[in-house]
Amino acid sequence: MLGMLMMPTAQADSLPAPIQALADQGLEIHGEFDAPGGMRGFGASRQGQELTIYLTPDGEHAISGSLTDQDGDNQLEEAALDKHVRAPLEAETWQLLEDSHWIQDGQRDAPRVIYTFTDPNCPYCQTFWEAARPWVDAGEVQLRHIMVGILDADSPAKAAALLAAEDPAEALVNHKQGERISASAQPRDIEEQVYANNQLFEGLGLSATPTSAFKRQTDEGVTRLDRVEGMPNDERLEAMMGGPAPE
């Protein structure tokens, strides 16, 4: 059975030369796991995408890719990546979302939190906001709108205006209910918040608003991070919200 070990700093500083060369090229090496055939396996990622690296027995070469057995099975490798690479990356992503610049939509103590990238000019963001009202109004879900400006030329200024409002939550509700926010110059620190949100959006490899992230429980009881790009269908919406709409 493959067993991934999270790599302590000292070990990470003394990686085999071929693995270190890949790290120098931008790969993040997360840990080492047992591999067959005398090889050493390493879990790695690049810009959030996980991959496996295998060091040949002579220690002179590294091979990137998936390893399968005679039955075409790579489940052991997948299990190791899932537990020790994907899960830490998801935790890191969730922390980045928490640390971003967002507007609270819903009760502070709502049991379910969903981060959603919102552009003030995005019609699908408007549709998603409206569709989420039953859960939000019932206190079951809190949306955290990470304000970005990516769709139109005035999107960044509108996003900044919402973040800079005296009551951003109220301003967002008014905007969604038809009192559209106007683009206006804002203090530099507010404009930088929108820029940072845009950078986060791009850094996560996203391409559509709304894109929403939420935590879910697997059948094994493990908490994982899930995301939906664009406006979800009814079935996906219920899964995001944690169940059917409240009566």
Image: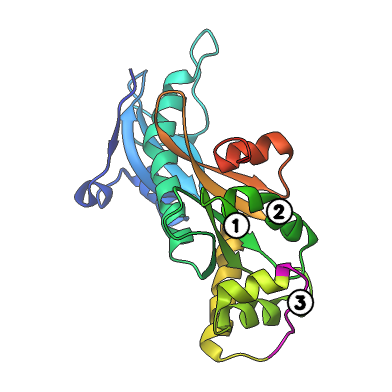
| Residue 76: mark in rendering | none
101 vs 83: above or below? below
Question: Which numbered tag is attached to residue 128?
Answer: 2
- Numbered badge on residue 180: 3
Circle 2 residues within 10 Å: few <14, some 14–19, many ≥20: some
Q: Earlier in the sequence, mark 1 or mark 3?
A: 1
Residue 37 quadrant: top left
Binning the other alpha carbons within 10 Å of mark 3 as few (below 14), some (14 to 19) or many (20 upward) gives some
Viewer-side label of 1, 3: 3
**Crowdedness of circle 1 by 10 Å Cα count: few (<14), some, many (20+)?**
many
As drawn, which residue projects farthest toward the top?
Answer: 71
Magenta part of the chain: 176-184
| Up/down of 126 relative to 51, above or below | below
**Pick the front one: 56 or 192:** 192
Front one among 170 and 99: 170
Q: Name the residue that disc number 1 marks.
A: 116
Q: Position of residue 88 (x, y in %)?
A: 38, 44
Q: Amino acid at mark 2?
A: Phe
Identify the mark nearer the N-term, 3 or 2: 2
Which SS class for mark 1? strand
Q: What is the CA distance from the residue labelled 2 to the residue labelled 1?
A: 10 Å
Q: Is residue 39 above or below residue 116?
A: above
Q: Which one is in front in this view, the residue at disc 2 or the one at disc 1?
A: 2
Position of the C terminus by quadrant? top right
Horizontally, is 23 left or right of 196 in the view?
A: left
